[in-house]
Image (cartoon, rainbow, N blue to C red):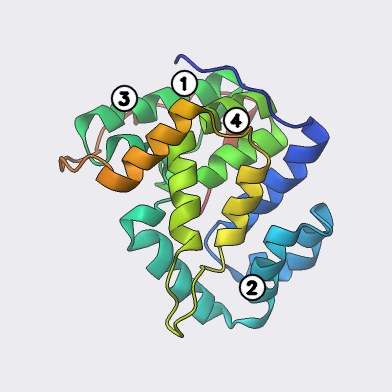
Amino acid sequence: MRRRRTQTRSRADVRPVWAACSALLDYPTAELVAAIDDIEALVPGNAPLAGLLGHLRVVPLGDLQAQYVATFDHTRKCALHLTYFAYGDTRRRGQALLRFKETYRSAGVVWDESTGELPDHLCAVLQLGATVDVATAAGLLADHRAGVEMLRLALTRWRNDDGTTGSPWAGALVAVCATLPDLRGDEADAVRRLIEQGPPAEEVGLDGYGAGPALIAPATLAVRS
């Protein structure tokens, strides 16, 4: 897969933020809530994440899970799967998903097929960068920068039931985007087009996108079992 080389901030800066956001953007579980203090210790004083950390501490788990599903599973503009923004549910998306798996393999890991999750999940990309290969993850984020920015804007503009604006999870996207280079002209144009037009809408199944036998590798990547 052709990847655009891009500068990121120092490894010591981005890896704790990516590790924290990989956990915080995953489906809320009792284990996640119990680990909030440890996650916060990775990013002390990170202002964009403060609101989300506080939200996860005080809201009952069942309510957190319902909010998460309503936000990320029922709203197209808030999809956590990066290829969705570029390809929607079109046939080309299957090839893009295969390229994600190949990129993971080139970094020395294999995608865990048993989870049932797709390999373009933002949490997995952030996990890759935080624990295995920051440059490879940065390349994937750069390739899908328009989608990352679209997700940030959608969460920032989210309308809550009480009339306030801004999803509790918006801070995680703000924190991730703060670790990335400033948008260049063509990237800003891509974000504008995505906002105006949305993802492609051709409806196709994604069965068989690359469910061959997993290769043996030093590590595996997965989100949400």
Q: In the figure, residue 86 lies in which quadrant?
A: top left
Q: Which residue is mark 1?
A: 102
**73 or 208: which is nearer to us?**
73
Tag of residue 95: 3
Comes first in the chain, label 2 or label 3? 2
Q: CA distance from mark 4 to mark 3?
A: 18 Å
Instruction: State if disc 1 and disc 4 touch (CB < 8 Å).
Output: no
Q: Is 100 on the left or on the right of 200, as rendered?
A: right
Nearer the viewer's eye, disc 2 or disc 1? Answer: 2
Mark 1, other Cα within 10 Å: few <14 / some 14–19 / many ≥20: some
Name above or below for residue 24 compared with residue 60.
above
Q: Which residue is mark 4?
A: 137
* Picture residue at 44% right of the left edge, 82% below the top: 163
**135 or 199: which is nearer to us?**
199
Name above or below for residue 19 compared with residue 161.
above
Does dot 2 land on a helix, a strand or a loop? helix
Mark 3 belongs to which amino acid? Answer: Gln
Q: Is 11 on the left or on the right of 207, as rendered?
A: right
Q: Is 92 on the left or on the right of 132, as rendered?
A: left
Mark 4 belongs to which amino acid? Answer: Ala
Comes first in the chain, label 4 or label 3? 3
Does dot 3 land on a helix, a strand or a loop? helix
Instruction: State if disc 4 and disc 2 touch (CB < 8 Å).
Output: no
Instruction: Check the image and name the residue furthest to the top.
Output: 2
Does dot 1 land on a helix, a strand or a loop? helix
Comes first in the chain, label 2 or label 1? 2
Mark 2 belongs to which amino acid? Answer: Leu
Where residue 115 appears, x then y in whole percent?
A: 45, 47
Q: Is residue 102 visible?
A: yes
Where residue 53 appears, x then y in whole percent?
A: 69, 68
Q: Which residue is mark 2?
A: 56
Q: CA distance from mark 2 to mark 3?
A: 36 Å
